[in-house]
Image: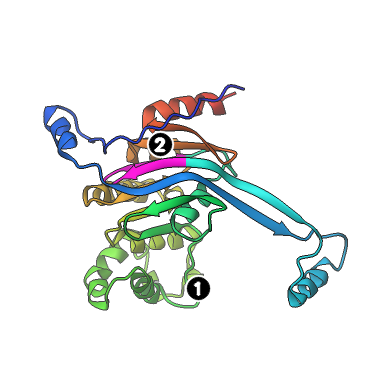
Amino acid sequence: MAVAEHTERSGAPAASGQGTEAQAAVAATPWVPTVIAEDLHIVYRVYGGAKGRGSATAALNRIIRRKPGGGMREVHAVRGVSFTAYRGQAIGLIGSNGSGKSTLLKAVAGLLPAESGRVYTDGQPSLLGVNAAMMNDLTGERNVILGGLAMGMSREEIGRRYQDIVDFSGINEKGDFITLPMRTYSSGMAARLRFSIAAAKNHDVLMIDEALATGDKKFQKRSEARIRELRKEAGTVFLVSHNNKSIRDTCERVLWLEKGQLLLDGPTDEVLKEYEKFTSK
């Protein structure tokens, strides 16, 4: 099965409009790197191997004794990935399940150590995933406050943006859900609120892991519009999604990973065309 070869294309941010005015704006845009990955390798080490019943007890004993035991298995999740992201870009990450997309974002966010290679970032990366931690026993209102504080917003900023966050999420359209505990929310409502909290702040680097896969079409359109706003406000956005339409509508550049390797890096239409050929076989 033929796979497109990796090509490094890290050009300046592309304009969303057409014509000489848009082209002139791109030409005048300084190429400011926000994320640089150099020959990045990420390796997971899985210790132990359950053999029959009682393996949970055996695993607990190993933890208490601080002995791995049971052997070790290595998973090479990211293999020699290199790229440079620039301020003002929205970059899509595509690939099969287990291709290393989420692992790569966690490494950029500083949540996973590199086995070898380096990641350099300009500013503070923020990772938003559908499984991002929220306090289920607290109300949506309290989670908005805590989430804003965790992102470095002041209480005054949160107060000013609170109603916009709630309105953007749409969770109050069918009732006063913002005053109810998070455990009463559907998975879609919780994901919309998480995205709304994260999108309320202008980020140096915002990484979104499948957040647009939840919610109705109306919310997806609002989310895509907000991502475009974040780009205009000089941030860099990474979007992991299995929805090629969301990638096309949101990103001008795409990184395609398979089995931890970067196969192609280039303009959205070109990369998706090759990816769709690959997945149709």
Q: Is residue 197 depicted above or below 3 in this figure? A: below
245 to the left or right of 168: right
| Res 122 → quadrant | bottom left
The answer to whether one can see residue 240 in this image is: no
User: In the image, residue 106 lies at what x, y percent?
Assistant: 49, 55
User: In the image, residue 45 lies at what x, y percent?
Assistant: 67, 56
Residue placed most toward the observer, 213 or 39? 39
Q: Quadrant of the C terminus?
A: top right
Amino acid type of the residue tagged 1 in the rendering? Asn
- Residue closest to the far left: 21
Q: Are marks 1 and 2 in contact (CB under 8 Å)?
A: no
Q: Residue at x 44, y 51 (%)?
A: 119
Mark 1 or 2: in front is: 2
Residue 86 magenta: yes
User: In the image, residue 264 lies at what x, y percent?
Assistant: 46, 31
Q: Which residue is mark 2?
A: 254
- Residue closest to the far right: 52
Q: Which residues are magenta?
A: 82-93
Q: How many marks?
A: 2
User: Secondary structure of the magenta portion, mostly?
Assistant: strand
The local secondary structure at tag 1 comes to loop
Q: Which residue is mark 1?
A: 136
Q: Residue at x 70, y 57 (%)?
A: 46
Question: Callout 1: 10 Å neighbours few (<14), some, many (20+)?
Answer: some
The local secondary structure at tag 2 comes to strand
274 to the left or right of 22: right
Q: Is residue 112 depicted above or below 84 in this figure? A: below
243 to the left or right of 155: right
Amino acid type of the residue tagged 2 in the rendering? Val
Q: Quadrant of the N terminus?
A: top right
